[in-house]
Image (tube, grey):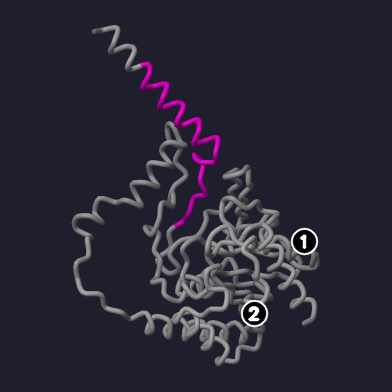
Amino acid sequence: MKKLIIFVSIFTILIILSVNYYFEYIGLGDPVRYDKDVVYGYAPKANQKKMRFKKSLITINESGLRSIESWKDSNKKKILFIGDSVTYGGSYIDDKEIFSYLVCDELKRFTCGNAGVNAYGIINMVHRSRYDERIFDADIVIFLFSGFNFTREYAGSDIAHFYLNRDSFFLPGLMEAISFIFTKYDINNFLSKKNDAEKYDHEKELIDYSLELLVSETERLKRENKKVKIFYTIEKDDMQSKKLNNQYILNNLKSLDFDNFYSLENILIKDEYFVDNVHLSSKGHTVVAKKIISIISSN
């Protein structure tokens, strides 16, 4: 019996170590860390360099922006990109494959900073632009979003499995996987937070409010003599924006007559430009970068 217990214990330990090794091998264990902010929700902690999925490098500079260049110390004119995970690029796209890097790799007179953050909605984007003093000195501000950003409520730091500390954990790959599972399948969602109320559908009101915020912020930025450009990206399963919400949002964006509004409907025309329904592949980032480069170069 004692030998059996020893054998089972050793076998269990080997299994746990093997699982942890596998998770670390695929890129888990040392995630990007975030700072909580009550106004814009959260943003990456400054000064990080991580190797994540597919050996992709993720660099966060001293200003909390995804960029291999310094923002604070740059003497060049600055282009700030604001968006969600589409802009951020994801942990499976290398620093040098995201469109924010590709733009400044071509337009070397500029420094590019990427303020895209996973799960941001329009409210988060606008508040980040308005209240994050580290990025106030941008010369050009580019917002990039899709329809679903307008129906996202304000995202706080508890919205996903983000690490809000720099702590090191034993078996880090396994711990990150457990953190993800426990956050995604929080037992509270099945107990106290299980929602049995009637659905109150205020999506249209949220869209309208988000549009108002966007208009207000673009006008504020322009009063500060910044150039503002707005890009609308699409969903792979709705390339013509025929879904009711997407159609409503796109029509409103066009009717608002922004000085520099661009839809990517005629750019993202191939399935290979996406890794899923919304996030871009490296090819998708390349074609978006070319579009942005052509617009900035012509202005």
Residue plotted at (68% across, 70% down): 79
Q: Secondary structure at mark 2?
A: strand
Please provide the residue range marked out in magenta: 10-35
Q: Position of residue 131 (x, y in %)?
A: 50, 72
What residue is shown at x 55% (from left), y 86% (from top)?
253
Vertical order, 27 against 258 (above or below): above
Left or right position of 195 against 36: left
Residue 204: which quarter of the image? bottom left
Q: Amino acid at mark 2?
A: Lys
Q: Position of residue 182 (x, y in %)?
A: 33, 47
Answer above or below: position of 297 versus 166.
below
Corner quadrant of residue 256: bottom right
User: On the image, numbered disc 1 is attached to which residue?
Assistant: 105
- Write the residue at 43% across / 85% down: 208
Q: Amino acid at mark 1?
A: Asp
Image quarter of the C terminus? bottom right
Q: How far from the left and from the top, in percent, is residue 270?
A: 65, 66
Residue 297 placement (x, y as % from top left)? 79, 76
Magenta span: helix, strand or loop, mainly? helix
Sooner in the amino-acid sequence: mark 1 or mark 2? 1
Q: Quadrant of residue 209?
A: bottom left
Mark 2, other Cα within 10 Å: few <14 / some 14–19 / many ≥20: many
Depth check: give the residue in front, 142 or 180.
180
Q: Any mark on residue 229, and which?
A: 2
Give the left or right position of residue 285, taking residue 153 as reference: right
Q: Quadrant of the N terminus?
A: top left
Magenta residue check for 258: no
